[in-house]
Amino acid sequence: MTQLSVRPAWAEPPSRGVQIAKAVVIAIIVVMMLYPFLYVVMMSFASPQAAASGTFLPTSFSIEAYKNILAGGVVTRALVVSAGITIVGTVLSMVFTTTLAYGLTRTRDVPFSRTVLVLVLCTMLFGAGIIPNYLLVRSLGLIDSWWALIVPGLISAFNMIVVRNFFMELPGELIESAKLDGASEFQVFLRIVLPLSKSVLAVIALFYAVGYWNSFFNAMIYLNDAAKWPVQLVLNQYVVQGSTLTDLQPPNVPPPPSDTIQKAVIVLSTLPILIAYPFAQKYFTKGVLTGAIKG
Amino acid sequence: MSAPVHDAVSSPRARERVADSLAGAARPRRTLWERIKREKAMYVFIVPGFVFFLVFAYVPLLGNVVAFQDFSPYLGIFGSSWVGFQNFVDIFQDPEVLTAVRNTLVISLLQIVFSFPAPILLALLLNSLVSERLKRFVQSVVYLPHFISWVIVISIWQQVLGGAGPVAALLDKIGIHHVNIMTNPDTFAALVTSQVIWKDVGWGTIIFFAAILAIPQELYESAATDGAGSWRRMWHVTMPGLIPIIALLLILTIGNVLTVGFEQILLQQPAIGTERGEVIDTFVYFRGIAGGDWGLAAAASLFKGVIGTLLVVGANKLAKRIGTGGIF
Amino acid sequence: MTDPTTRVTLTRRSLFTLTFGVAATGLLAGCSTGGGTARTVNKAQSFAAPKYVAPQAVPGGLVSKVPGMPPTYVNPPKTYFTTVPTPPGDGSAVTSFQILWGAPPQPEAKNKYWQQLNKNIGIDFKPTLVSSDNYNDKMATTIASGDVPDLMFVQDSTAVGAGAINDGVFADLSEVLAGDKILKYPNLANIQTSTWKASAKNGHIFGIPNENPYLSNFPVIRQDAMKAAGHDSVPTDGDGFKAMLADMGKLGKVQGKQFWPITGLTGNIFNIAQWMFRAGTTWQLKDGKLVNVIETDEYQASLDYLNQLWKANVFHPDAVSLGTQNEKNSGLFTAGQAGLHVDSVNGFFGAAILTDLQKNTPGADPIFLVPPGHDGGDIVLQRDAGYWGVVGISAKAAKDPKRLALLLQVCNYWRAPYGSKESLFINSGIEGVNYKFDSAGNMIPLGDDTADNDRAGIQWLGCFNSPTTRIPLAANKFVDDYQAKVEKLTAATVPDPTVGLYSKTNTSASAKLGQLATNYQNGIVTGRMPVSDVKKYRDDWRKAGGDQIRKEFQAALDKA
């Protein structure tokens, strides 16, 4: 797939000064963002002794930390659980989010839809607290089930509103002419709206996927069986810093994991998303709407 | 600023704006029932999602009734005693509440001014790069901090900016001693905002990229043919394409002005002190959840929600009046 | 034939009602499944002590004459005795709610320790494992749902725990265990009367408490750093101590590593200063009236002292943050970069901090520290409350006396004393899987991390046997120093008069008052606030609940 790294014909090249300024700013930003992450990754590969000396650049290489975490299969299993929840959750969320977003694009014509929109908006401002949510999930019989991690968060009001916003910015003529040709709402949705919204759909799918992958609190509250834990919950056990209990040292507690293990945990918990991102990035290509008007 | 270029392309939102200005002009009258029948298909789209929000957002909200109780988990709603508005009174009479509100507003305002525009600027900067490879590389790099949890972020910032870190050592060499940005209460609001920018600016650009890429290339071409340079193209083509999403996000941000990072601030509060380090969420945490006072926590949440709703409604009206279009 | 429009309407409306109704009913039903009735469980009654039977002695320990100091064992027991001859269970499921400190254990099918536990006790153990930083939240939701597990570890100093006890979540064991009745569960009889009394609420026993020695945390100092700074022994007064720490601070590097005399400004550091100024216990009686330590002049002097240490660059620049980051702080000491460190037996010996320190930093010479009195006189330490959390038995489960007896038998097995086969299993695991014995009977860990994890996740029910200090072979050289110094410290402890008394405001306001303490103490020590702000602290403390707590404790004290 050819990527144009060529300046389009209508654009003039920027001045030397602007180019240098841009380069400097970008270089600074890249270093500031990349350095801490690289530091974490490098430290995760350090041998325990080198890490203890606290230098900025570790001097030896070892996969002790990873071996330690992955031994016993608990983490591996948790990774599979998380992957399953992320995939199922993202697919379901996208279906429900896009349909609701489409349904609310014409609040002027569809009675009560503006009310629905306002009600949905309000859910972003009010919270219920952990106990009512827990009792609801319990009354639906979802305690200790993976569905408790998907169903309560199925639609994010924010994501839905962003998608709706994009749908509403699409050119009206396309939809109108399709309807004049006899297309149903559903056909308009599937054949016109969705294909033209690839960029925002990729973005929202990415938001959902990251949300499901990182979900921690729901898993902690709703899952009692440790064998069902997703990866964030398992990895949290390695980096727990303090307890809410007391600051007295509790008796008979196993020693805390070393710094290298904690760094390896960070790498493991973010690695899958880093791998998945480039696939979503494919959809951030130029000019999705280019040519659509003429067509 | 000249009229948004997008009026040439008639989106549903543009037509809504036209309809707004025609308000009062005669339109064919239909009964409610006829309109519902006409749009039956749309209801198929709306109902499942709406039911979801009713069940999973509104039913639990009933639980906020404990704001008027001295709630105990085991006794439940029916077993706990009622205290009327006492929880609200407790909040407003607390000597710390003004400090918490003031700090929250200061930090929120700083973030609206600085960390809200940051992703937009970064998106525009990256958009102006010609090399696709470089653009993708930088895109991938800038979102990395988003994935690091606050505990690690604070720890890393401490290592670099703390009293024992390289920045302090450098400043020491040139004669400025005992600089510890991480423990200075006077710069705390700026520190918090910088941390938010560092962590989320990259992630924030994603949504703006999607908006920028939805702008047809022909508009740039025609603007260039009309003699517009790169800055004017940005102003007249790119920015108008971003206005809707910017307006949306700004309205939501304003609605959330009483919420600033909880974990981020809780972790740094011991070093900064409560005079500058207490915000509404930590204030409620120490009294409500950690203190086992569920009623007070619910009261605070209700109050924040009401204020937030008023702000969103107000911001939405304002947005419609200045022509960017609101959310609803 | 029904009118299509009517049918559509009915369907939609009933769907709405159904969903909303079910959810609402479920929610409301859930609201009342809590099950607690009026808060009469805490009507005061006189405390009826269970009988005390000392645990079977294991020969070879260093038994200290100082009360409150557990026996120290350096050599392994020659033989292990049995306290539970037959498995007490009937194969039924027993659920628990306990803290998971480390990595999660393997599921039961793969977990040898778990299977052996089920066999040994005769139950089908089903624990709910919760991380320590989310324990309160999950406890709150579990209690709200009414599905209380059979055995639950409760830290009754937290608001959720205290609230749960107060609302009757747990069974009242006072009658079942009083006097000779406890002899049915011989290992439970090893719990000292003072511990039962301290953990009782208004005379009611709501759980099996864990005994604590009089002192759990003690300081260690790097003697090599002292010598490098020109001090051969610990100075005998406050000024000398300050000078020594300041000199150690000027070193910059010790044994080649960047070094600070004190790294983390933890609660323990504040305690040491208070010891030196004899500030006393948190609550003290002056002429029969309760006074809080922060209201004393000695407390103010201790803060002033720490502020002087701060000005003398004794602390790490990020000491305040490190004070909340236990692992990092510990890590600095283990890496050889801290001069002073306060930890427990579990930390110094169990987690092998001392031996690791010497491995990482050759030349490091840690010794236990008895700080000097500020004026050369005695020091005064606060005696530990005497217990660390209780294991509560679900009130619902306990309604069936046979079930209650079974659950008590489970606790009985779990807290079998040191030297018993049961304790060997609970604490060390399975021979050949977690450890092996050498010819001298010493226990050699096999280093199988997965097997150790399997054990660690399951064993921490929160029900421990009477404390003993076990020092592993590798750390034997520290024993004499440990014994001598910690005896001195233990002998200097003084009990707090409010131990065993219940004040509702004390638990509900503890988070808020803790935040207040953090703010003022950190502020004064680091110089952000002047020492005279102690007055402001006292005022704020009184208004935020201090006076109310004093009233409640005083009332309970006058009644007792």
Image (tube, coloured by chain):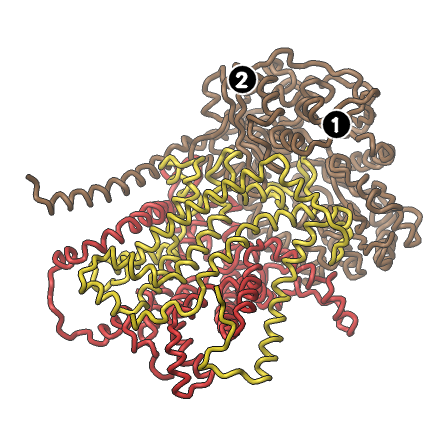
The vertical placement of B87 against A194, above or below, is above
Q: What element carries label 2?
A: helix
Residue drawn at point x = 32 percent, y = 48 percent: B52
Q: How crowded is mark 2: few (under 14 residues within 10 Å), some or many (20 or more)?
A: some
Location of mark 2 (residue): C406
The image quadrant of residue A246 is top right
Asked whether disc 2 touches disc 1, contact meaning CB atoms under 8 Å apart, the reply is: no
Q: Which amino acid does label 1 sit on?
A: Thr
Tell me where residue A195 appears, x and y as whole percent: 34, 60
Chain of the residue where label 1 is placed in the rendered structure: C
Q: Would residue C505 be seen by someone viewing this image from the given angle?
A: no
What is the total number of numbered labels drawn onto the structure image? 2
Question: Chain A, which colour?
Answer: yellow
What chain is colored brown? C
Tell me: B202 left or right of A292.
Answer: right
Tell me where residue A121 appears, x and y as whole percent: 34, 58
Location of mark 1 (residue): C468
Q: What element carries label 1?
A: loop
Q: Would residue C368 be seen by someone viewing this image from the given angle?
A: yes
The vertical placement of C514 against C98, above or below, is below
Q: Which amino acid does label 2 sit on?
A: Leu
Could you tell me which quadrant the N terminus of chain C lies in?
top left
Residue drawn at point x = 53 percent, y = 36 percent: C162
